[in-house]
Amino acid sequence: MKRRALLSTALGSSVLMPGCLSLGGARSGEGTTVEIIPMNSTDHEISLDVAVYATDGSLLLEHTYSLDAGHADESQGVENRVDHLIVSMNDGEQLRHEYDPGVEVAEFCSRDGEDVQIRVEPEGITFTYSC
């Protein structure tokens, strides 16, 4: 009887685990997406329109963020084939940013899929990368 209980527990665990873990214990899918993370470092609410384009020219994401002062939003991610982003704040001038995390970030990050942080500051909009 103990043997059957052990086998059923082992079988149940093996059915549940593949979706959660991959080899090495890493989460499945990690590194295959680029998170788009706008951050509002101003003292007022902003509206930020973001469009993300793929290397083949297709649109990966078109989203409008409403960000309170001092807040960020990590709710959107895209496939790891980003070419460039087009961003505008409060329906203003569009700013194009070429996706280029650089060698220093690629070496620091263990896998592809460097995230894009869009920093909105009183002086303007800047872009940085993180893992």
Image (spheres, rainbow, N blue to C red):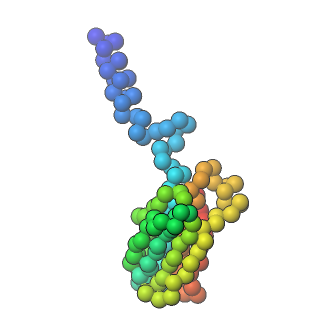
Q: How many marks?
A: 0
Residue at left offset 48%, top offset 44%:
27
Answer left or right for 11 relative to 120.
Answer: left
Residue at left offset 71%, top offset 60%:
103
Residue at left offset 43%, top offset 83%:
46
**Residue 127 image point, x, y percent:** 59, 73
Q: Which residue sits furthest front?
A: 56
- Pick the front one: 58 or 119: 58
Answer left or right for 49 relative to 130.
Answer: left
Q: Which residue sits furthest left?
A: 1
**Residue 129 image point, x, y percent:** 60, 65
Placement of 16 over or under 109, stated as above or below = above
Answer left or right for 102 relative to 87.
Answer: right
Is residue 20 visible from the viewing direction of this image?
Answer: yes
Can you tell which quarter of the image residue 109 is in? bottom right
**Residue 108 image point, x, y percent:** 67, 55
Is residue 41 visible from the viewing direction of this image?
Answer: no
**Residue 84 image point, x, y percent:** 56, 70
- Pick the front one: 85 or 117: 85
* Quadrant including the N terminus: top left
* Quadrant including the C terminus: bottom right
Answer left or right for 34 relative to 63.
Answer: right
Placement of 37 over or under 1, stated as above or below = below
Residue at left offset 44%, top offset 79%:
48
